[in-house]
Amino acid sequence: MSSKPHRDTIGIEDAVILSHEHLPGEQHILRVQAPGCAARARPGQFAHITVDPLRPLRRPISIMRHSAEQGWVDFLYKAVGEGTALLARRRPGESLSLMGPIGRPFEVREKRPLLIGGGVGMPPMICIAESLRGGDRHPLVILGSEVPFPFDPRPSQIMIPGMPEGVIGSMPLLEDWGVACRLASLAGFAGCHEGYVTDLARHWLEALDDSARAEVGVYACGPHPMLEAVVALARDYGLPVQVSLEEFMACGVGGCAGCVVEVQTDTGPAMQRVCVDGPVFDGYRVF
């Protein structure tokens, strides 16, 4: 058996675009028919996608949702460069080459997972939340964005201890699943906390008693400064923390070593590849 079994999941298939939703802030939700990827995907993994037939270099995009039964996979991405701008032009019915799922996934162990996603780091948190539906764990999802959220926030009917007054905005999909969620932004959106995701997380952690706080594990994906702040927050409370890193990639399968980051190991610092040694790492080993 491979010492890194998550590498054995990688496959290549021609994925047919089922839908392509275009949202404010150059955000897009892409759904493709990709049965192989859908059957093997786990929260935190990503796919390496060919954005255009004339652009050989693929783009890594996190998996947001997937259905093994129906064979589809959803991706949320933001068009920030030439490659993703080309991807945004692709239409339903067209095919694209998809490699995936790739990478080390999140491993959720605690009874009270605290899921923190910022910007295009939201998809892995949604994927974790869906994987926990109907189980005995009680996640709290905190999402942050400085552009309009890729959904219309809904006032939540789920009470969450410690939340500041008026912070009631939630993601409708999570609300429908019965998953507690709150939103944060510095852009002044109604119902959202005007501040950072870590501020909301601290409010919640402070409201828990010691026994409940001992059941919390932190999981995060988003911009580097946000992840650094999340790890600092987890350190303040002595909580385990896993982070998913975002790096530029070329091959996406560990061959080019273009996405390496320094990670602290038991034997000292080492350079590890985000694509296959990650993208999920122990937060304390990265920060």
Image: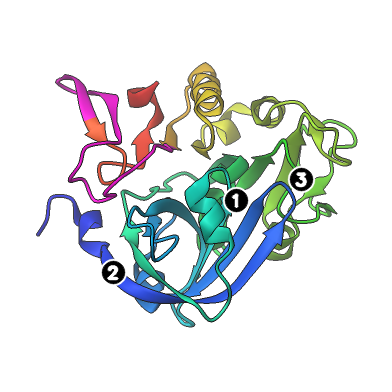
Q: Are marks 2 and 3 in contact (CB under 8 Å)?
A: no
Judge whether residue 285 can be spotted in this image: yes
Identify the amino acid type marked 2. Answer: Ile
Q: Residue 129 location in percent, x, y?
A: 56, 55
Q: Amino acid at mark 1?
A: His
Q: Quadrant of residue 157?
A: bottom right
Q: Position of residue 102 (x, y in %)?
A: 32, 55
Residue 12: give its label: 2
Specify whether residue 149 is painted magenta: no
Amino acid type for the residue under numbered disc 3: Pro
- Which residue is the extreme one toward the front? 54
Outermost residue toward the left in this view: 1
Marks 2 and 3, how far apart in space?
33 Å
Reading the image, the residue beneath label 1 is: 138
Residue that appears at 57% across and 43% down: 80
Q: Quadrant of residue 281?
A: top left
Magenta stretch in the rendered image: 244-271
Q: CA distance from mark 1 to mark 2?
A: 35 Å
Of tags 1 and 2, which is closer to the observer?
2
255 is within the stretch colored magenta = yes
Q: Is residue 58 left or right of residue 276?
A: right
Point out the tag, 1 or 2, that comes first from the N-terminus: 2
Q: Mark 2 or mark 3: name the one nearer the start of the chain.
A: 2
For disc 3, the marked residue is 148
Residue under the point 60% across and 50% down? 138
Q: Position of residue 246 (x, y in %)?
A: 43, 38
- In whole angstroms, how far apart are the C-alphas of marks 1 and 3? 27 Å
**Could you say which is closer to the camera, residue 212 or residue 58?**
58
Check disc 3 and report its element: helix, strand or loop: loop
Q: Residues within 10 Å of mark 2 (few under 14, many from 20)?
A: some
- The numbered mark, 1 or 3, whose residue comes first in the sequence reads 1
